[in-house]
Each structure stands twice: as C-alpha cells, then as structure tokens.
Image (cartoon, rainbow, N blue to C red):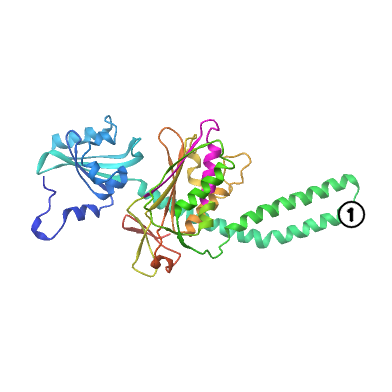
Amino acid sequence: MRLGFGKGNGVDPTGVLNAIASAVVVANRDGKIRFVNQATEQLFNTSASVLCRSDLSDFIPSDSPVFSLIKQAIDEATLVADHNLLIESPKIGKHTVNLTVGSMPDDSDCAVLTFEPRSIAQKIDNQLLSRNSARSVSAMAAILAHEIKNPLSGIRGAAQLLEQTSNEDDRVLTRLICDEADRIVELVDRMEIFSDKPMERGAVNIHTVLEHVRRLAENGFAKNLAFEEIYDPSLPPVFGNRDQLIQVFLNLVKNAGEAVDPQDGKIIISTRYQHGIRLAVAGGDARVHLPLVVSVRDNGPGIPQDMRESLFDPFVTTKPTGSGLGLALVAKIINDHGGVIEVKDVPGGGAEFQIMLPIYNRALAEGASEQPIIIDNREYTA
C-alpha cells in the first residue's frame, strides 16, 4: 500500500503526515488499522506500534457511525464526512470530532480517516479563559488591598469608639459592625494572594510535589478516601515554583475529596508525557513544549455543564459555604507557569482536571513570561 508520495522527490510521507495537526488513520473495510500519524497517538492515548496491531473497534464502539462511513467511502469510492461526531470509550475517553473519510485510489479495500478534534479549540479557549480570569482576579486583589482595607479600618475604629459610650443594645450593633469589618478584611487578605508578585521558578520534581499533597490529604480532609497513583517515573523536572504547585494540586485534590461519596470515594492522580502542545517564547524562535501532564480525577458526580464556562472565575462555587476562590487561584498559578488547565468528564461519572506544564531548561528559565499560545504548530496570541 502506497501513501501517495514519490520516493525520488526527497519528501518523507511519514514526516508530512506527522506534521498534520489532525489525526490521520488508514484502515481497511473491517477496521484493521494500517497506518497512523503522531496526532492519532495523542487522540487515542496509544503508541503507533500498538495501534497498527489493533482494530478501530478496540478504541471506538463497533456501533459508531465511523464504521459505516468507512464502508460507504470504500464502496462508493468517494469522500464522506460527519461533523460534531461524538466518539467515546473507556480507552480514549470522550471526544467531539469532525471526521472525513476518503477511499484510497491505490487500495480499494482501505480508507483514510481524518479526525479533527474540537479539543484543540477547547485548549485555546480554556487557556485564554484562565488567563483572563487570572488577570481579572489580580486586578481585583490590587483594588481591594488599596481601596477597601483602609476605609474598613476607619469604620472599625469609629465603631469601637461608639461602643465605649453606647448602651448595651447599641453595643450589639457596634460589635456587628466590627465583626463584619473583620470578615471583609479577612476576605481581602485572601484575595491578596492573587496579586502580581514576582515568582521564583526552577527545576521541580512533580512527583515529590504530588506525594507531599497526597500525604497532606490522607492525614487530613481525605483520610477515608482511596488514592491511586499512576506515575511516569521518567518525567523530567517541571519549570515551576514548588510551593505554588503544592497549592494548585492541594486545591484540586481537596475539591475532588469534597465531590466524592465518603464511603467509596476515589481520587486518581496520574502523570504522563505527551507531544503536540508548545509555547512560543516571546522575543525568540524557541518553542517550549508543554509535555508534562498531571491529572487529578475523581469518581464523583462531575461538574454541572452550566458551570463549565465560569468554572475558573472568582466567587463561582457549588459549595454552600465555599468562597469560590480555589479554582481562580489554580488558574492564576497555572497561568503564571505558562501552562494549560482543562477539565473533562470521566466516562462512568466524575471529573478530571488536566494540568499541562513546561519542562525545565535554561532557555525557558531565561525567557519572557508573556507567551503566545502554540497548539499543534499553530499560534494564538492572548
């Protein structure tokens, strides 16, 4: 089977196909996989060597419209397409894709499938959303710190003076004023952690961070929950701030612990390496990969669909007593690290937060902090 490139023109067909952002699969009428590019490895979370020994039905349910499109394309020797097609299985998770299937002229029993995952656009939207949320919270923190705390101090002082000359009934009101002023000051103090202070970054072992978070959780708020760790021990160091990364994953694990059933709750923390998502460092030609993926997954009820777009905004929460600052802080810290955060549904129930982070290297450590988004070789500026 030829892939349609001449051997004498100096063009490597595999290299060309691997440069394509969409997942390309060559499969026969029965769904036997004959060829995949690198984007397919990312979509199916499986290596090319394994995929080429497998059937599509090992990753996509056999009743999916994908298989009828393959047969139609081969039988009619034509090109067919389906938009906003949902493919879902325990192996690959849930993906919404635009699928194009065309017959191969040189092999009447094979078709070329091109999957264009909408997750690429979602990564862009999520990154821009977390950046904007982080900036809005930082601005709000600065305003609160400078414009609210000083007047509150004066109000509280005046209430204390009034209390000295008031009767018992009036003292109830003055104490109420003081208590409310203290409560607002405490909220402002919490907001000040969002201010744009310089952050020191270096080489951080992400597994050391995650082990520390797990120990804190198991000896505190998640002592009755089950933890599962799926780590890739070969991962290089993260370019980050250890204390702030602990804060990120402690918040995510705490949210997961509060979402699950105390009787059979489970939290899965995993790490892996992936290709395809990079950042362009401003002022240079260097491309910084975001290959380190850390996932925090739970078996709770998941996140309501109507909250997805505002999930990382400040003061948005589903908890009766929550402040809505936890995920806003997570978004800011990940933004400061130049990373990407996503939230996904888990097949069978639950939610999964995925954090994509850069690896440590000298060029990145000396680079600029404000970077355009590069996803699958395409640049998007925030």
Q: Is 6 left, or right, of 147 in this rendering?
A: left
**Residue toward you, 13 or 142:** 13
**Residue toward you, 216 or 339:** 216
Could you tell me residue 38's position as x and y percent?
26, 50
At x 23%, y 49%, the residue is 37
Could you tell me residue 192's position as x and y percent?
62, 58
Write down the residue under mark 1.
164
Quarter assignment of residue 193: bottom right
Quarter assignment of residue 53: top left
At x 35%, y 59%, the residue is 379
In this rendering, the count of numbered labels is 1
Q: Is 155 left, or right, of 117 in this rendering?
A: right
Instruction: Give, as a three-letter code, the residue at label 1.
Output: Gln
**Residue toward you, 363 or 279:** 363
Q: Quadrant of the C terminus?
A: bottom left
At x 70%, y 59%, the residue is 149
Q: Quadrant of the N terminus?
A: top left
Asked if the stretch drawn in magenta spans residue 257, the answer is yes
Could you tell me residue 153's position as x and y percent?
75, 59
At x 57%, y 50%, the residue is 314
Asked if the stretch drawn in magenta spans residue 372, the answer is no
Could you tell me residue 187's position as x and y percent?
66, 52
- Residue range corresponding to the magenta coloring: 248-272
Look at the picture and state if 221 lies above or below 313: above
